[in-house]
Amino acid sequence: MGVQVVDHPLAKSMLTALRDRGTPPPLFRLLTKRLALVLCLEATRTIPTAAVEVDTPLARTTGARLAQPLVAVPVLRAGLGMLEAVTELFPEVTVGYVGLERDHATFEPSMYYSKLPPLQGRAALLLDPMLATGASASAACDALEKAEAQQITLLSVVSAPEGIERLQGLHPQVHIVTASIDDGLNQYAYIVPGLGDFGDRLFGTL
Ligand code: URA
């Protein structure tokens, strides 16, 4: 599948504030949630619906309901900042968690936690705000594919070209929805210009 860059003016202005090193954690959390709402709306534009009849005060008409519940999977810990947006938009969503930490020397991830609800035949929204090397996102997609998710969409705030290339190479079926494709990675595998360490900025652990 492809990469979709959400360039709505509201998304751009919220991303700019997230990038600003002076944005404190409470505002960072609020903006993350609001931006995730926009990303989530875009990511779910084509999810299946079923026809349903409804009586308005004036007439019977045909409307739509969501055909099946989604599964949201935040990657710990930064992905937690995006979860509330999804649960607010889709109250029926089931939620799984994947914990990945990256080795500071090799930048390769190892999974220290995985708790997934049934995924067979379901559409999954993977919440991972920084698509950097693509290693964590790929490892998370491995887990979702092993659990037989039917469709995976990655919601990322900022993506690096390197991460996109790696993820698309390893998981060509995964759809990526992001607010920006940045210039690239620095020697520490941080995204430039990026916004720094997302988890630290979200939780005030700088
Ligand atoms: N993770 C982050 O939080 N920031 C980056 O720039 C890359 C990975």
Image (cartoon, rainbow, N blue to C red):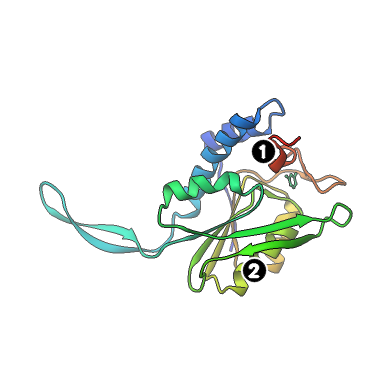
Ligand 1's quadrant is: top right
Residue at the (64%, 60%) spot, across then down: 98
Q: Which residue is mark 2?
A: 143
Residue at the (72%, 61%) spot, across then down: 112
Q: Where is 125 relative to 158, above or below?
A: below
Query: Residue 203, which numbered label?
Result: 1
Residue 93 location, quadrant:
bottom left
> Secondary structure beneath disc 1?
helix
Residue 52 appears at what percent x and percent y?
A: 24, 61
Q: Amino acid at mark 1?
A: Phe
Q: Dot 1 surroundings within 10 Å: few (below 14), some, or many (20 or more)?
A: some
Q: Nearer the viewer, mark 1 or mark 2?
A: 1
Residue at the (58%, 64%) spot, across then down: 1
Q: Quadrant of the C terminus?
A: top right
Q: Nearer the viewer, residue 126 or 45?
A: 126
* Residue 134 seen: no
101 with respect to 128 (left or right)? right
Q: Nearer the viewer, residue 105 or 188?
A: 105
Residue 134 appears at what percent x and percent y?
A: 73, 57
**Among all residues in the image, which is located at the extreme left?**
58
Residue 16 appears at what percent x and percent y?
A: 63, 32
Q: Where is 160 relative to 193, above or below?
A: below
* Residue 128 seen: yes
60 with respect to 38 (left or right)? left
Residue 33 location, quadrant:
top right
Q: Amino acid at mark 2?
A: Ala
Earlier-in-chain disc, 1 versus 2: 2
Is the residue at mark 1 in contact range of ligand 1, meaning its CB lies under 8 Å from it? Answer: no
